[in-house]
Amino acid sequence: MIEIKNSINWYLVKINKSIAAIETFKSPVNYDELRFQYSILIESMFSLIDYIEDKKTIFNNSKFEIERKIKKEIGFEGNIIMDYMRELRNSIIHRGEDVVSAGNVINGRFAILAPDNVTNRSGNLIEKPKDMFLDKLLSILDNATKNVTKSELHRLNVLEESNVQSINDLATRIKNIPIPHHAPDEVKMMIKAHQEKTLEEDIFSMATDLYNASLINLKGNLDIRMNIQHLS
């Protein structure tokens, strides 16, 4: 579970860094940076969704169940928003789509219009959601994805503080950290001596501190939401 927790947290870091950057954009703005951050945000959201889909056996989910849960969490236009944003992501990755080509400044912040004429791989037009601003659609997807991700992690007790099994696994890893083969012999001897002197309870205490610190970080990243008050 440690790898899953860390991987999910990394996707959240990417999502939240792009959100933070987008929320600071004011006129005039570097166009390439604007396009980059919106593209990274969309890509990272679906990277997180697809990662949980890839781990569906561990999460006890059926095929594509994670997307169905997110669509349900979105509620109104859940299917339309998810399908539209998925194909927008595909257009960015596979066809170099510019998702910030149209927009306006509202209350001092950029408001990007959701692109028209988004198509799937077959060239068929995807139904566009009713919300005209991409920022609103991103906020909806961000909120739903994080809510569902949090629920999925709760089901597996990943968000449980001082999870004994996870801490024991981490303690075992710390205990068995290999000595770098390229280190000088004197350094190898020092590392080995330190490992032999370190008590089991000290290793467990270290693992507990590391685990709980990473858990606080993960929970914090799950709670961040995209601010779209400028559209109110």
Image (cartoon, helix red, strand yellow):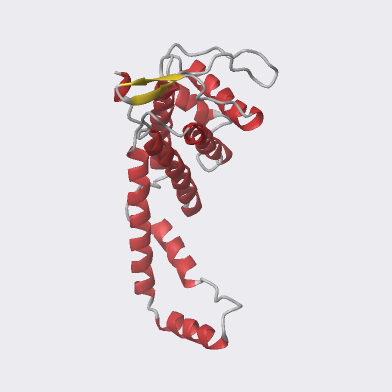
Point out residue 74 in the picture as x, y percentages from the top left corner: 41, 22
Viewer-side residue, 40 vs 204: 40
Q: Is residue 141 left or right of residue 183?
A: left
Q: Residue at x 59, y 17 (%)?
A: 118
Residue 77 in which image quadrant:
top left
- The answer to whether any part of residue 163 appears in the image is no
Viewer-side residue, 43 vs 115: 115
- The answer to whether any part of residue 51 appears in the image is yes
Viewer-side residue, 97 vs 187: 97
Indicate the quadrant containing the C terminus: top left, top right, bottom left or bottom right: top left
Q: Residue at x 45, y 49 (%)?
A: 5
Q: Is residue 94 left or right of residue 184?
A: right
Depicted 148 relative to depicted 178: above or below? above
Point out residue 111 in the picture as x, y percentages from the top left corner: 40, 22
Residue 201 in which image quadrant:
bottom left
Point out residue 41 in the picture as x, y percentages from the top left corner: 48, 34
Viewer-side residue, 145 vs 33: 33
Point out residue 70 in the picture as x, y percentages from the top left corner: 46, 26
